[in-house]
Amino acid sequence: MFFQEKDQRLLTFAASLLMGIGLSACFAGLLFPLIPSDFSRTKRLLKFIQEENKANTTLVFGSSIAMDGVNTLLLDEIRACTPETTFNLSSPGQNQLESILLMSSFGESRPKRVVHMLNTLELGNQDFLSRRVIFNFLLFGYRPNQFVLNTLSITNNAPTLNEFASNRFAINFENRGLVTNFVNAGFRKWIRNDLLLAELEENIRYPRNYVSRLEDAKRLALIRQSNPSAEVRTFDMDSIKWEILKRTSLFLKAQGIEYTVVLSPVNPELSSYSSVYFQQLDHFFTTHPVPNVQFINLATFLTKEDFVDHIHPGESGAKKISAELAKRLPSCSSKQ
């Protein structure tokens, strides 16, 4: 009798546990937007693009390099355009594929121009669209259009949004908020305590990720880790990434949106990338024009003093980049 009662209690506990997990999975999708996610600006950016964006805007997309490197307040001040305004919609880890998810979300008020900063050192690699990124978008109400579905179909490593969109249980179960926040809190405290969480989540003008130069030991360790062991003398553009760029150009052109592609600055301390590599890079983009695309190559534009770590521009770097973009972007429709 004792063992029967004990077994019954165990079965009841197991059933309750499974029921709790099931309920958590069902409600996770509803709770997810309420749980702050340190490294996700998705909800804020989608809301701005779909509801707040006005006409005569320039929207900047890219990773944390663009977050730290493009001060749109300074850019607009230098350009002195009326009534044009520039917004920085970059986010940590935002690669080419994530950028097109955002670009495909424009509401009735479309921007005048898109400025897309690509990581120069990733141009030879095909991007990956992770489950985390896809689930963030779907949880915040994103639905892919035909341009996105057709574009993702040519990639080797990006799962289709349709597969995930049809599986609501999997999406709801993917609640990583609390774990992410715990890991990110430790990351900020012990490794990068110069991260500005509030800025990262909300700021869409100059959303700086990193505000101070890393101490030499940490900075040099990152540089050693990121520097290829052998000299890099050949630039090879990934064919899929190039095809996606051309498709993006056609998509934006059909909506009357100008498209500027910026090649991000490379820290000169990454010395394995030779001058021949950068010459080939420049030659490729000079000799491969794409309709409706303006290329701005800033790969060798900054000095090592303009970086706070191995890849992120500091304030001095942002000033130089923003001033250069202000000078090289197409002229304003009206100028003061």
Image (spheres, rainbow, N blue to C red):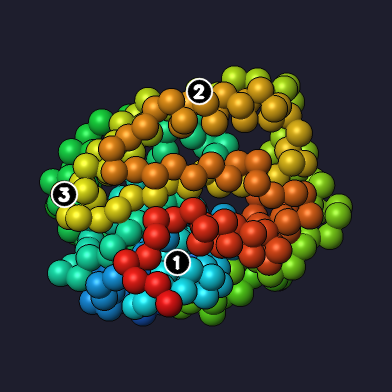
Indicate the quadrant where residue 276 lies: top right
Q: Quadrant of the C terminus?
A: bottom left
Q: Earlier in the sequence, mark 3 or mark 2?
A: 2
Q: Is residue 182 visible?
A: no
Q: Quadrant of the N terminus?
A: bottom left
Q: Mark 2 and mark 1 in contact (Cβ < 8 Å)?
A: no
Query: For the residues marked 3 and 2, what is the alpha-carbon distance in whole angstroms?
Result: 29 Å
Q: What's the amino acid at mark 1?
A: Asn
Which residue is identified by label 1? 88
Residue 20 in the image, given as x and y percentages of width and height:
31, 71
Residue 236's disc is: 2
Decide: few, some or many residues near mark 2? Use Cα within 10 Å; few <14, some 14-19, many ≥20. few
Residue 87 in the image, given as x and y percentages of width and height:
42, 70
Q: What's the amino acid at mark 3?
A: Ala
Residue 178 in the image, given as x and y percentages of width and height:
47, 70
Q: Earlier in the sequence, mark 1 or mark 2?
A: 1
Badge 2 element: loop
Query: 105 and 159: which one is in front?
Result: 105
Decide: few, some or many residues near mark 3? Use Cα within 10 Å; few <14, some 14-19, many ≥20. few
Which residue is identified by label 3? 254
Query: For the residues marked 1 and 3, what is the alpha-carbon distance in whole angstroms?
Result: 23 Å
